[in-house]
Amino acid sequence: MNIHKRAINIAILVLTIVLFAGMSNKAYCSGLSGLSEAGGGSWASMAVVLVTEPVGVKRTDEPVEVVLVSDKVKPQGEDIRVTDAGGSEIPCQVSATGAHTYRIAFIAGAEANSSDRYHLYYGNPSAGKPNYGTLNSVVNNYSKFWQTDGAYIGWGGRAGFNISGKNAITVLRFDNNNDKNPTNDPDCLTDELAWAWFYGYLGSNLNADNPGDFGISQAQLIENGPVFSEIALGTARLRYYKDQKWIMANGVVDSVFCFNKNYQFMKNGLGDEVFVPNLGAGDIRQWLTGYDSAGVNPKYLAFRNPNNGVVFGAIAKDVARWYMTAKCSGAWDRIISFDDSSGRSNAKIYWYSDTSNSYAGIENLSKSLLNPLQVELITDAEPPTTSVSVTPPGPDGKNGPDGKNGWYTANPQVMLSANEPGATYYKIDDGAECVYAAAFTVPEGTHTITYYSVDAANNREQEKTLKLKVDSSPPELSAGIFPKRQSNYYFINEPIAISLDATDTISGVFSITATLDGIAVSDGEELRFSKPGEHRLTVVSEDFAGNAVSKRETFVVGYDVAWLGASAKEDDAGNTLISAEWYSSIPLRFTVRDAVGHFVEDRTVRVVISDGSNTAAFTYGKTSPTVRINPCDEKYLLYVYTKNYSWLTAGGTYTVSVYFGGSDGAPVILHDVATLKLY
């Protein structure tokens, strides 16, 4: 396996953020007393690691890395801590890679097409290095093995395959049974010595002393911790992540050989599974090419052994060209190989194996590794600032000592805007706190809106308040004429009281005014009328916000008309019925009194008789056929001569209406209606 000298980032986006002395010294000690090895100190700085899932697959337990550049961190990064969004500490692996430069790796996850937040704390001089444990990796250059709690990789030529000048990895184990002892797990490479080796220049370290010797490099453990262990074989790099089913290597690995006819199938991630024929030991045939990428990433290449349920393969990222082939020879070669001439510094190869006897595992893993979690490191020590605007832009209340008193007469809309990404929250009075999404309407009343924002770095703004007074409803008006009479009909000289009352439970009643026929009247004022007529009371009330309500009430003042004679009576419905004998002259008699029962002589009287088509009208006069007034016996008398009105006939029914008014420009008022029946 040839390995170029290059950095490892396992198909994970690495962000570098520079944080030097100009940043805020705000301490983030609240709620962090549980962070390990705090030493009694607090963390001066905090950043947010925003992890976003890009392709619609839920991710769990996926390694991510960020690079932090800061002069606030202790020399070896001992004071760096990572927590999830709920504040629970997550084991992280910190490497000081340069002056004030730290690589931080931890295991993360995110829901499909969504983001999750992790918090990065640092800048605590009192903090000590946390003890998260390690993968217990050991490298023994002489015995040539590397052991972790989940993998075992050995190298050195297998008997009969000792290739001069090359190191070969012949054992690859995963702790699939989770007993922390990988030596009793199946060898994913050999499968009973089936996979022969990672073939390549693993130990290549060409030096001036011996340029032809490719085998002088010994394996070195260059890093181990709670997240991963990494070894180097010359310029080669192999990295094992805790609890993963794969090992990552540089992208210059040449190939993997398998000499086992039981791996009878091969598949690339873009095509169907291909059967690999097994011929006799001495039957050497041509190569069967299962896949040649020719620049198109097939997602993965894999072989399957249907006899023991093992699928082994590789996923390549940013590799120019790679192949999967099988050779029908005595050795039954099965090969996954890579073009190491691409020169792509970001090329990564992920070796994968499990016992699912299907390609689903490597298929799902390829989707994740080829579309890694997107990682953004957000550093911000300053809280956001939320601005508020109100529509309409200001209160329009018009009543009060200064003409303006802060009342809105239209329900205002409140818009909140933070100066940086994050979330904004608000509540009205003591109501439930809401996440601001769009402008909201403030209801009537006096309200306090409390609001604040939290930025992407979890900095919380101090709460702000906005007080708004809203009254969009007019007062409730209860005003009118008292006492109440049927049909608003009152008698002459009857005392009438004006009642003015209004209530407003929000801004309060500012004013209430009234006019009677255009003349101002006051609450409780008593009125008496000496002439019949129609009158209008208008009442207007305003609240302090300027909302107005008006009420108009019309009433009639007139006489109490009563028909006289034995022939005049009321029917069951209270209507006056006059029965008269049809003759040449029909007498109609009635009396008119005021509110206190005094007879009233009013010469504006007018009596109208009608059958609906024909009408006869009679006014005051001293001789018939006019309406005459006899104050002595307190009655009005009208003789109607039937010979003058051919439509007045025996057996007919007619309407008799009595009106007063009409003089001095006063309107004519209907005072009474009776039914006349002739027999």
Image (cartoon, grey):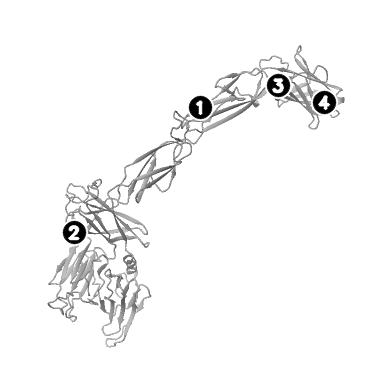
Dot 3 or dot 1: first in sequence order is: 1
Dot 3 or dot 2: first in sequence order is: 2
Label 1 residue SS: strand
Query: Which residue does the numbered mark 3 point to in the structure image?
Result: 664
Give the quarter of the image for residue 238. Answer: bottom left
Q: Residue type at mark 2: give it.
A: Ala
- The 10 Å Cα crowd at callout 1, few under 14, some 14 to 19, many 20 or more, is some
What residue is at 30 percent from the left and 49 percent from the top?
Answer: 458
Q: Is 122 in front, or is 159? A: 122
Label 2 residue SS: loop
Q: At which x and y percent is residue 235? A: 19, 71
Dot 3 or dot 4: first in sequence order is: 3
Q: Are marks 4 and 2 in contact (CB under 8 Å)?
A: no
Q: Residue type at mark 3: give it.
A: Asp
Q: Are marks 2 and 1 in contact (CB under 8 Å)?
A: no
Q: Residue type at mark 1: give it.
A: Ser
Q: Are marks 4 and 1 in contact (CB under 8 Å)?
A: no
- Distance from Cα at disc 3 to Cα at disc 4: 36 Å
Establish if 656 lies above or below 30. above
- Distance from Cα at disc 3 to Cα at disc 1: 36 Å
What residue is at 71 percent from the left and 21 percent from the top?
Answer: 664
- Distance from Cα at disc 3 to Cα at disc 2: 109 Å
Query: Which residue does the numbered mark 1 point to in the structure image?
Result: 511
Q: Is residue 286 left or right of residue 642?
A: left
- Distance from Cα at disc 4 to Cα at disc 2: 125 Å
Query: Which residue does the numbered mark 2 point to in the structure image?
Result: 99
Q: Is residue 226 left or right of residue 618?
A: left
Query: Which residue does the numbered mark 4 point to in the structure image?
Result: 678
Q: Is residue 542 left or right of residue 131?
A: right
Dot 2 or dot 1: first in sequence order is: 2
Give the quarter of the image for residue 637. Answer: top right
